[in-house]
Every structure is written in structure tokens, then in C-alpha cells.
Image (tube, grey):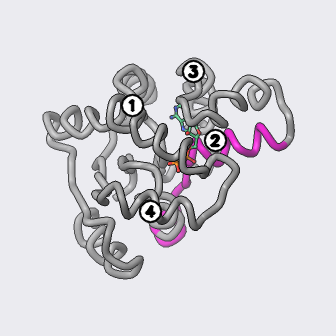
Amino acid sequence: MKRLIFLGPPGAGKGTQASVVAKGGDIAHISTGDILRAAVASQTELGKQADAFMSRGDLVPDELVLGLVKERLQQPDAQKGWILDGFPRNAAQAEALDQLLQGIGQSPDFAVNFDVPDEVLVQRLLSRGRKDDTEEVIRHRLTVYREKTAPLIDFYQSRQKLVSVDGNADVEQVNQHLTSLIS
Ligand code: ADP
């Protein structure tokens, strides 16, 4: 369980589970959303370019995200393993990740799909209250997820890397199921 891709809609609980699993396994938790939000907050060049896309709930352009993932995967703490949380998010990113990993002689062990009904997602995100968590932006993020990200479920299934968890259970149950699948 050293190299994992967490797939799933916004609000599915990927970030929560990724933190726990990464800590337990002493591997890097790489959340592109967190990295981008930090860049926006500190107004780096990356942050300035990403801000408008994120506020609308659109994907940030691939080249911006790919650069940061490439850099992050090369850092020392990622050498023991990693969880990619929120990346890849479309077919082009998945292809680019393949190339990138091939170049460094790595491959993912599993892609974990977090399955949660839409109405549960909307309620969870509304109660979270992040800047991009207004109902309109949430609905748009879900549409973007269905159009761009959900097809990656088949992509990893066809490579026999896919496992699925019911993300609508409580945090502890999801964690137990996840751990049993990936260990
Ligand atoms: P959520 O899963 O709740 O939507 P994230 O923190 O994963 O939250 O992402 C928040 C926003 O950051 C996304 O709506 C998108 O604008 C941007 N983002 C994060 N990861 C990516 C990515 N891999 N490619 C493009 N944009 C991304």
C-alpha cells in the first residue's frame, strides 16, 4: 500500500482518509487542492493563475497542476510512497501521470474509488463552508467531476488497479474497509 490514487467526487472524504492512511504508513499525502489553496493564499504566480478557476469550480489548467505534482513526487518524503488526493482529475492528467511515473520507475498499487451519492455530497460540502463551497459552485464541481474525472474509474479498472469503498459509511468504517483493501 505504498502508492495510491484516491478518486472520487468532491466531499467524498478522500482528504480525511488520505491524511490517516498517509500518517499510518509514513508516506506522503499529496493533495493538489491543498497545494493550490496554499498557493492562492500566499499569492504565488501559480496561485494567481489558479484562483479564478478554483472559485468557479473549474479544473485548473493541466500544465499548472502537472508541474506541481512532478515537483512534489520528487521530494524526499515521497520516496517511501504517496497518496495522490485529487489528482489525476481528467484523462490527460492520468496519461501524464503514467508518463511521469514511468520516467521515475514507479507505478500505482491501487486507485481507490470513493462512492457517495450526490445529495450526501452536497450536504457535506455545504456544511463545510469553504470559499468554493456555495451551492452553485458545488453543483458545478459535481458536473465537472462526472464529465472529466468519473471516466478515470474505467481507466484504472481496465488496468486492474481499481478498488471501491462505500464513502457513505462513517469515517472509522471507511478507514477499516480501505485498510483491508490496500494492505
Ligand atoms: P474537492 O475535492 O472538494 O473539489 P479539492 O481540494 O480536491 O476539493 O479541489 C479544489 C479545487 O482545486 C478544484 O475544484 C479545482 O479547481 C482545483 N484542483 C484540485 N486538484 C486539481 C487537479 N488535479 N486538476 C485541476 N484542478 C484541480
Q: In the image, is residue 64 above or below residue 139? A: above
Q: Do the residues labelled 4 and 1 touch (CB within 8 Å)?
A: no
Residue type at mark 4 is Gly
Q: Which residue is located at x 59 percent, y 36 percent?
A: 74
Q: Do the residues labelled 2 and 1 touch (CB within 8 Å)?
A: no
* Secondary structure found at label 2: loop
Distance of mark 2 from mark 1, alpha carbons? 15 Å
Residue type at mark 1 is Gly
The residue carrying mark 1 is 105
Q: In the picture provided, is 110 more to the left or to the right than 79?
A: left
Q: Give the range drawn in magenta.
A: 21-41
Q: Which residue is located at x 57 percent, y 18 percent?
A: 63
Q: Is mark 4 within 8 Å of ligand 1?
A: no
Rendered image: mark on residue 13: 4
Distance of mark 2 from mark 4, alpha carbons? 25 Å
Rendered image: mark on residue 61: 3
Q: Where is residue 133 shown, x and y percent of the image?
A: 60, 52
